Image (cartoon, rainbow, N blue to C red):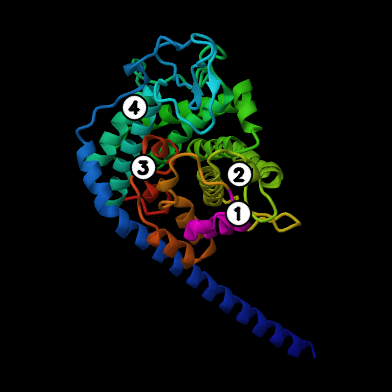
Amino acid sequence: MKLHTTITTGILLFAVATACSQSEQQRGSIQDAVVEVIVEAERQRVIESADAFLAAEPVTVTASSSERSAGGLHDYFSEGTYWWPDPDNPGGPYIRRDGIVNPDNFVDHLDAMKRLSTISGTLTAAYLLTGDQRYAEHAMRHLNAWFVNPDTKMNPHLRYAQAITGRVTGRGIGIIDTVHLIDVAQAANILAQSPYVSQFDIEAIKTWFNAYTVWLKTHPYGIEEMNWRNNHGTWWHAQVAAFASLTGDEESLEFVRERTKSILIPNQMSDDGSFHYELERTRPYAYSFFNINGMVLLAHILEIEGLGIWDFELEDGRGMKKAVDFIHHYTRHKEEWPFEPDVDYWDELPGQQPFLLLSAMAYDDMEYLTTWQNVPEVPLSHEGLRNLVLKNIILWVGLPNPA
């Protein structure tokens, strides 16, 4: 009996191991297929853009300033997106018009940061695809200007972001502006493995991001943003995860993971997988996409760091998969959107959302990939580009470093 049990157990273990091996092979095959589609779709655009960017000079916060800023030359400054002069009180405090962008706001620093994200990310993606030394070196020129060179670098804080004339010199929700440093941090993470860059400069860049992470976790603005109930809270956690991944800050990564499970998912997600606080906005469709992209990126970074939450569920079934499936349905069937249409920029959406690609890889689901392929790519307005965080998905799909 004992021998029979041992043999039977051995057969079962072999069968389980074989099944697991086949499952892992299938998973790897699906992930490879997703990556292949992404590379095929992005290669020409990335290389052509990178070639053009080889002539682009760095532009940092020191290149422009506003008399309305309470900060200095090296301090980032921006103004509240939806705040306008009060027609009943000219010269008085601004008033809020949710969802309606004030075109007269100071956006030079935000545009410069988006430009940095686009240029450094594209050059690094081209380096991943080709191994060409020129791309890595020129990407580092821009990173050095922002984070290393004392004459041009930005101070590692956001005390003067999204100021409101007549009300505040800066706000915690201004931290949403630095979502555009997420691709930058990932580019630095990749370039750190390149033989064509200075490790001294890489360490200086890491020091900057570590200092900024400390500020995010300790300054009242950062703490306020961390606890914000909607996409602002989501993107605070995504930023800290991305920056901690670059600097090797394991404590912050674990902190973000636990808060995602205990705060973000329970407080933001409804039973159907929607994000109720985003649905309250005047642009519920756009903000639903913005939030799911943040959630999915956060899950992706944590997975890279061995702290996966893709399969995490609360007792009532709410979790990443339910959220992805909710917005995926309305990506495919925009005409079925059961809530009010967005007050502006409605025709730009849904567009080719990055959450679909990362979710396809995480859940081995080709349907997400098919949806991404079939959604028309629409030119984005300034507002659309402001909310486009992952500008180069090539940085995030695990391509081997050419080094």
Helix, strand, or loop for circle 3? loop
Estimate the spatial distance between the alpha carbons at disc 2 and disc 3, rounded to whole Å.
22 Å
Q: Closer to us: mark 2 or mark 1?
A: 2
Considering the whole magenta stretch, tell me its main secondary structure. Answer: helix
Identity, as a three-letter code, of the amino acid under mark 4: Asn
Q: Closer to us: mark 1 or mark 3?
A: 3
Residue 149, position as x, y percentages in the image: 34, 20
Residue 323, label in figure = 1
Estimate the spatial distance between the alpha carbons at disc 2 and disc 4, rounded to whole Å.
40 Å
Residue 98, position as x, y percentages in the image: 54, 31
Identity, as a three-letter code, of the amino acid under mark 1: Ala
> Which of the 4 image quadrants contains residue 268?
top right
| Label located before the other in sequence (1 or 3) | 1
Residue at 49% x, 8% y: name it. 91
> How crowded is the residue under tag 2: few (<14 C-alpha within 10 Å), some, or many (20+)?
some
> Which of the 4 image quadrants contains residue 375?
bottom left
Helix, strand, or loop for circle 1? helix
Residue 380, label in figure = 3
Helix, strand, or loop for circle 4? helix
Identity, as a three-letter code, of the amino acid under mark 3: Leu
**Mark 1 and mark 3 residues within 8 Å of each other at the beta carbon:** no
Tag 2 residue: 279
| Label located before the other in sequence (4 or 3) | 4
Residue 144, label in figure = 4
Vertical placement of residue 70 versus 232, above or below: above
> How crowded is the residue under tag 1: few (<14 C-alpha within 10 Å), some, or many (20+)?
many
Residue 400, position as x, y percentages in the image: 37, 54
Q: Which residues are magenta?
A: 320-339
Estimate the spatial distance between the alpha carbons at disc 4 and disc 1, rounded to whole Å.
38 Å
Estimate the spatial distance between the alpha carbons at disc 1 and disc 3, rounded to whole Å.
25 Å
Please state if 135 lies on the left or on the right of 88 as rendered: left
